[in-house]
Amino acid sequence: MAAMDEPRLLASLEDSGPLAVFEGFPREDLERLFGGWRLRWGLAAEGPEALYRIQRIPWSGPEEGAALPGAREGHLQWMPGEEDTLSGTGGRLRLAPGRPLARVAVDPACAEGGALGDLLGAALMHALALQGRLALHGMAALLGGTGVVALGDSQSGKSTLALACLRAGGRILTDDHLLVDPASRPPGLRALRRDLRLRGGSRSLVPSALAPLLQEEDPPGRCFLPRDAAPQAFLESLTPQRLLILAPDPRPSRLEVVPLEQARTLSGALRAASPLFHSGRYAAERAGLWPSLQALVEHLPSFLVALGPDLLADPEGVLAELLEQTAGGPGGPPAGSQSPQ
């Protein structure tokens, strides 16, 4: 990363207007880290800004602190304080409830761009929440004419499920980071991250027809499937008919599906926006997201799904079973539901 005298850069969502101003980050680094996101970049005007600011601050070395048990934002650990701190191998992110400012300290010893991308991505998720835009960590696909959205934490199986859908002849919207449009009923989905990004052994799951289109990226061992190179594999938007909450580890030996009451689905969907928003301190963020969350959940049958190794051995058969088991389920808004305070 370059020095802190970099120009202020404006990040805007495609077709949705300005989102955040980055201060102290080289443009080429931001374009690389967010290369698969639906973002446009430009110079931000000098002077006061009402937009969310993501500000680079000096690195002061490792810090000691107590993370909340099980409190994580993807690969980041969450340590509460006057400013909440999200820590990862790329550095630290500090933010506070209701405040349109994130401060990022970049660890100069970390050469992995993806680690820094996790920090900056978490800041953008907070910026979206303060604007009342619901962004979720989730996979969405069209399989056998049925739209499916699956929400879950990092390494819960979203990318594996997306690849299984492709192998079974389906099309995907995204394997992570999607936006909910609450104007339609049921709400429509758009991809916030355009490309399919793969880690580790996921490459072996890519259908043979798409494998030659994979592109390498840093760090070594990671690759991605560009949307523009394989438009036949991707969707531009999706109206889902099933909502799945992916269960964390440990994984079962085979697929397990359990219908979910909508109160639990709302909790799982809120966590997919950010675990921070479960905290009572983030009431403003929750209130802004609640109409979109409720509109998504109340229109879709919802299920808790645990993926097993049988998905890799027989993707077509397991996905057919998944669609069959989720053909019906709990419906309607949860009793007495209202925006949380």
Image: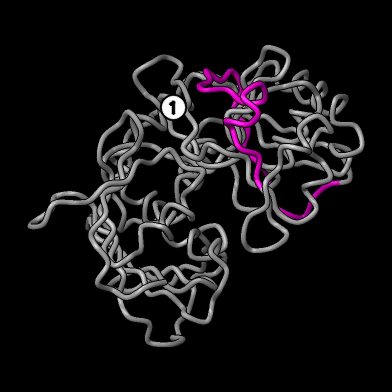
Q: Position of residue 3 (x, y in %)?
A: 32, 75
> Going 78% across and 38% down the picture, which residue do you hit?
211
Q: Quadrant of residue 308?
A: top right
Up-down relation of residue 262 to residue 202 (above or below): above
> Going 77% across and 26% down the picture, which residue do you hit?
322
Q: Position of residue 107 (x, y in %)?
A: 46, 78
Is 254 on the left-hand or right-hand side of 306? right
| Extreme-top residue of the structure | 145
Residue 202 counted in the magenta span: no
At label 1, the amino acid type is Ala
Up-down relation of residue 36 to residue 182 (above or below): below
Q: Which residue is mark 1?
A: 335
Q: Nearer the viewer, residue 214 or 205?
A: 214
Q: Quadrant of residue 145?
A: top right
In the image, which residues are magenta? 224-252
Tell me if residue 160 can be seen.
yes
